[in-house]
Amino acid sequence: MSGAPVTGRPSRLNVGYGSWDLIWSFVHRVLVVNVGLVAANLPLLAALQLVHQPWRYPVFFGILALGTGPSLAAVFGYLRRSDGDERAPVAELVRAYRRLAGRALLLWAPCVLLMAVAATDVYVLRDSALGLVLVPLLVVAVLVAAGSGVAAMAYLAYEDAPRAWRRTLLAAPYALVRRWPLGLMNLGLLAVALVMVNQAPLLGLAVVPGCVLFVVWRNSCVMFESTAPAATAEM
């Protein structure tokens, strides 16, 4: 079978205006989130670059890590507001930080303390006879504390009410336990993001955090939508 060769201009990818607007709106949100995270956690990032073995100074880095929670709450608050305004300005992130920072710190500090204590116990007991029994339990405690901390920061933004932090004490762990696959996915995404930022700091900070936290926020909303009524009834 023979035929004349088809000639002509090569086909081009035609993307409608709405698609381009959606893409640039997402890029805008990612860049705002990345800049906000770097600015809020600049002391921690600088210390991690200067200190070769940060785990040798748990108290110092534990104090610096306290600022991570309020910045996460601010990011989630910004992403919540950007649902109605896809190109919400950077000022919206600043307002979210001012609005949620105090409540976020009250909830984030116990999680950081629990993670630090459990991780230290894992390090101390790893080679002992009790380690075979206690280390797996302590690892679970670290994961629950980390997952509860992230869920609590997202719940503050989800409720966004002055007294929401009181309900968050029970609602966030409750949602984490009820929808543990989503909570585990969030922790896995955050762990991958940390590894990528550690391997390529500049490129990682410019791209990864905003994309990952966008997915974490969406997952958290699903967790709260399906569990918040039951949690409120039990409280």
Image: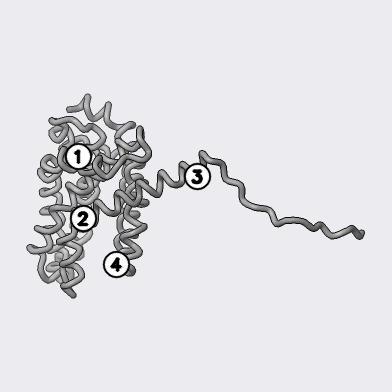
Three-letter code for the amino acid on which mark 1 is drawn:
Arg
- On the image, the x and y values in percent for residue 27 come to 40, 49
Picture disc at residue 20: 3
State which mark lies toward you, 4 or 1.
1
What type is the residue that disc 3 sits on?
A: Trp
The mark nearer the N terminus, 4 or 1, is 1
Q: CA distance from mark 4 to mark 3?
A: 31 Å
Q: Report x, y in % for residue 129.
A: 15, 69
Q: Earlier in the sequence, mark 1 or mark 2?
A: 2
Q: Which label was assigned to residue 95? A: 1
Q: Nearer the viewer, mark 4 or mark 3?
A: 3
> What separation in Å lies between label 1 and label 2 (alpha carbons)?
14 Å
Label 4, label 1: how many angstroms apart (C-alpha)? 29 Å
Q: Is residue 208 above or below residue 224?
A: below
Which class describes the residues within 10 Å of circle 2: few (<14), some (14-19), or many (20+)?
Answer: few
Coordinates of residue 104 in the picture (x, y in percent)? 15, 43
